[in-house]
């Protein structure tokens, strides 16, 4: 796939095809010589001195802007379990026990990478597991959900497009109950840790921002701020919710304290369940673009996505 990368100032430069590079601990997608994203197959430890329970695999960081620089953050000291782009269920019930696959400190569950199923020219499919610890964290965990995470990238009109598709199968003989809760599931995003109230903001498909967007529904949400590295000019991460997703357009979790976290939450309003042997699919697209949020551009991207 030949493409044209347009950097700030509308200076066209030739771009090679998207490609995938696999190492012992990562799978990276690149565009020519420029990085797009890195997925971690090996466990990444938390910062020195932090409880090792926060080690984790099966997430994306960093995600890059087309013009360079990172647009995700990892291991903030307020939430060491926040990891760039990731997903996990939070408040669940399974076989008479409450399990939290998201908040690792509780030691009741976690998400882990288990294998690479396929490498494609512009993407890959990873296998993950959401596991519980019914006999405690020192015992062998129980696999509740087996997952296939498909990540595919493209360059379009100067933007990176990243499809994030999660298939989750309940491989037990008990239902996984998902009570309504304010966050969890779907896709989660943590921005670079230097984003704050002064240099960043949210914009939803309904025209809402940091102060009034939490717990509303949105076809897409754009989050912009200064990239880490590069020239530190603004870049925007727009996350699109596929119209066929459960409870679409899904409700969202945003923060109003200046720190930037985002989550599409399929169960924020109504409970859900994944029955024994049942498979559910959640689809999202991430658009990474140069400059601040642009509502017209984001809506056009969502219309294209919905029509595919």
Image: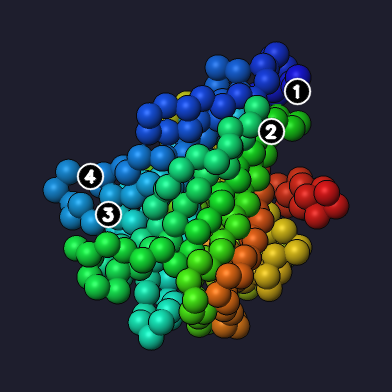
- Between disc 4 and disc 1, whose residue precedes? 1
Helix or strand or loop: what does disc 2 sit on? Answer: strand
In the depicted structure, whether residue 271 falls above or below residue 162? below
What's the distance in space between the residues labelled 1 and 3, CA to CA? Answer: 39 Å
What's the distance in space between the residues labelled 4 and 2, CA to CA? Answer: 32 Å
Which quadrant, please, contains the N terminus? top right
Residue 54 got which mark? 3
- Between disc 1 and disc 3, whose residue precedes? 1
Horizontal arrangement in the rendering, residue 216 relative to residue 108 (left or right): right
x and y, in percent, of residue 207 in the image: 70, 63
Residue 1 got which mark? 1
Whether residue 109 is visible, yes or no, is: no
Helix or strand or loop: what does disc 4 sit on? Answer: loop
* Residue at left offset 44%, top offset 67%: 144
* Residue at left offset 37%, top offset 71%: 100
Residue 154 got which mark? 2
- Between disc 4 and disc 2, whose residue precedes? 4
Residue 47 got which mark? 4
Query: Within 10 Å of the Cα at label 3, are there few (<14), some (14-19), or many (20+) other Cα atoms?
Result: many
- Quarter holding residue 219: bottom right
What's the distance in space between the residues labelled 4 and 1, CA to CA? Answer: 39 Å
């Amino acid at each position: 796939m030949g493409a044209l990368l347009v950097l700030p100032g509308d200076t066209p430069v030739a771009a090679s095809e998207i490609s995938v590079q696999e190492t012992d601990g990562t799978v990276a997608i690149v565009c020519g010589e420029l990085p797009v994203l890195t997925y971690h197959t090996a466990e990444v430890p938390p910062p020195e001195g932090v409880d090792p329970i926060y080690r984790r695999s099966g997430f994306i960081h960093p995600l890059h802007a087309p013009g360079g620089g990172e647009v995700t953050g990892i291991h903030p000291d307020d939430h060491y379990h926040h990891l760039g782009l990731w997903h996990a269920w939070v408040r669940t019930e399974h076989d008479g026990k409450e399990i939290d696959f998201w908040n690792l400190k509780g030691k009741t569950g976690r998400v882990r990478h288990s294998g690479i199923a396929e490498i494609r020219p512009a993407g890959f499919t990873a296998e993950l597991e959401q596991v519980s610890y019914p006999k405690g964290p020192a015992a062998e965990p129980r696999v509740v959900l087996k997952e296939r995470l498909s990540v595919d990238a493209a360059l379009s009109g100067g933007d990176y497009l990243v499809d994030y598709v999660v298939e989750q199968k309940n491989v037990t003989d008990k239902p996984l109950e998902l009570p309504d809760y304010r966050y969890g599931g779907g896709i989660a995003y943590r921005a670079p840790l230097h984003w704050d109230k002064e240099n960043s903001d949210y914009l939803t498909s309904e025209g809402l921002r940091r102060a009034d967007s939490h717990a509303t529904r949105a076809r897409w949400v754009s989050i912009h701020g200064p990239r880490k590295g590069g020239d530190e000019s603004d870049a925007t991460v727009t996350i699109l919710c596929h119209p066929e997703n459960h409870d679409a357009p899904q409700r969202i979790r945003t923060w109003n304290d200046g720190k930037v976290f985002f989550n599409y939450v399929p169960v924020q309003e109504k409970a859900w369940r994944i029955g024994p042997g049942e498979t559910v699919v959640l689809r999202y697209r991430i658009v990474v673009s140069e400059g601040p949020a642009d509502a017209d551009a984001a809506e056009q991207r969502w219309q294209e996505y919905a029509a595919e």
